[in-house]
Image (cartoon, coloured by chain):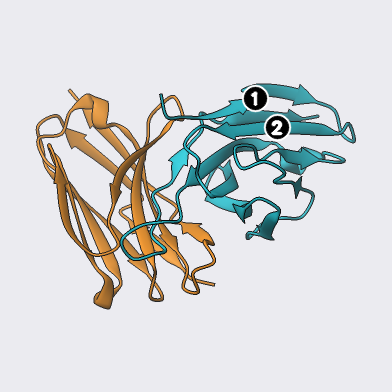
Amino acid sequence: GIQVEQSPPDLILQEGANSTLRCNFSDSVNNLQWFHQNPWGQLINLFYIPSGTKQNGRLSATTVATERYSLLYISSSQTTDSGVYFCAVEQPGGYQKVTFGTGTKLQVIP
Amino acid sequence: EAQVTQNPRYLITVTGKKLTVTCSQNMNHEYMSWYRQDPGLGLRQIYYSMNVEVTDKGDVPEGYKVSRKEKRNFPLILESPSPNQTSLYFCASSSLTGTSGNSYEQYFGPGTRLTVT
């Protein structure tokens, strides 16, 4: 099956710093989505981004499908950004089989 | 309010006692899915459903059953739970329509924390 790797696995930032999270996938994908899991376990949609670039406030994401990676940018980080960030891909074939990466755990300290 | 609901949110049970975790969505989504989340393993797909009466196995289906008799509901059934099924479970739904015909954006329920002793 498809392999999805995220880096770095752990990240500690000072409040106000910027960061880039990476998601690599081993095969072509139909769809890609970024999620934030907050410290209470809730999974929150960030971006649905099979290709191209999107921005939402301090967050933006870019997917280069031909090179099999996606990047999530967090600017001017805040303590509320802490949690785990996952990318998830839909495997080829259109059968809606989804594979998640193992996540990047982010801690933003004041 | 558009949402995915799961019940119960927390459950402690004993080995072998059948249980059902319910999942319901109010967005008229065709696609629904169950995941389990374990430390160090991320989220893994258990089963998914493309529509009523259409279900298929994900990556870790052993020990689980599902049914999709109504579009809005997708219960997860553990016929004989075992301690290795202790986990955090998420239900998700998405539409199967979009500009490309197969696009999706998944919406997740709040999670069910299951402990099997």
Query: Where is A59 relative to B17, above or below?
Result: below
Q: Quadrant of the N terminus of chain A?
A: bottom right
Query: Where is A84 relative to A102, above or below?
Result: above
Q: What residue sits right under mark 1 in the picture?
A: B7
Q: Residues within 10 Å of mark 1 (few under 14, many from 20)?
A: some
Query: Where is A108 relative to B53, above or below?
Result: above
Q: Residue B7, image x and y in percent?
A: 65, 25
Q: Is residue A75 left or right of residue A49?
A: left
Quadrant housing residue B104: bottom left
Are the numbered discs 2 and 1 placed on the same chain, yes or no? yes
Look at 61% across and 23% down and name the residue there: B9
Of residue A35 and residue A101, the one placed in the foreground of this image is A35
Of residue B88 and residue A95, the one placed in the foreground of this image is A95
Amino acid tagged 2: Val
Q: Residue A78, image x and y in percent?
A: 17, 28
Look at 52% across and 61% down and name the residue there: A96
Q: Is residue A13 left or right of residue B72?
A: left
> Count the marks: how many?
2
Chain designation of label 2: B
One can see residue A53 in this view = yes
The secondary structure type at the circle numbered 1 is strand
Q: Dots 2 and 1: beta carbons under 8 Å?
A: yes
Q: Residue A42, image x and y in percent?
A: 44, 30
Q: Which chain is orange?
A: A
- Quote the CA–CA distance across marks 2 and 1: 6 Å
One can see residue B41 in this view = no
Look at 67% across and 57% down and name the residue there: B54
Look at 75% across and 43% down and name the residue there: B84
Amino acid tagged 1: Asn
Q: What residue sits right under mark 2 in the picture?
A: B21
Q: Which chain is cyan?
A: B
Q: Residues within 10 Å of mark 2 (few under 14, many from 20)?
A: many
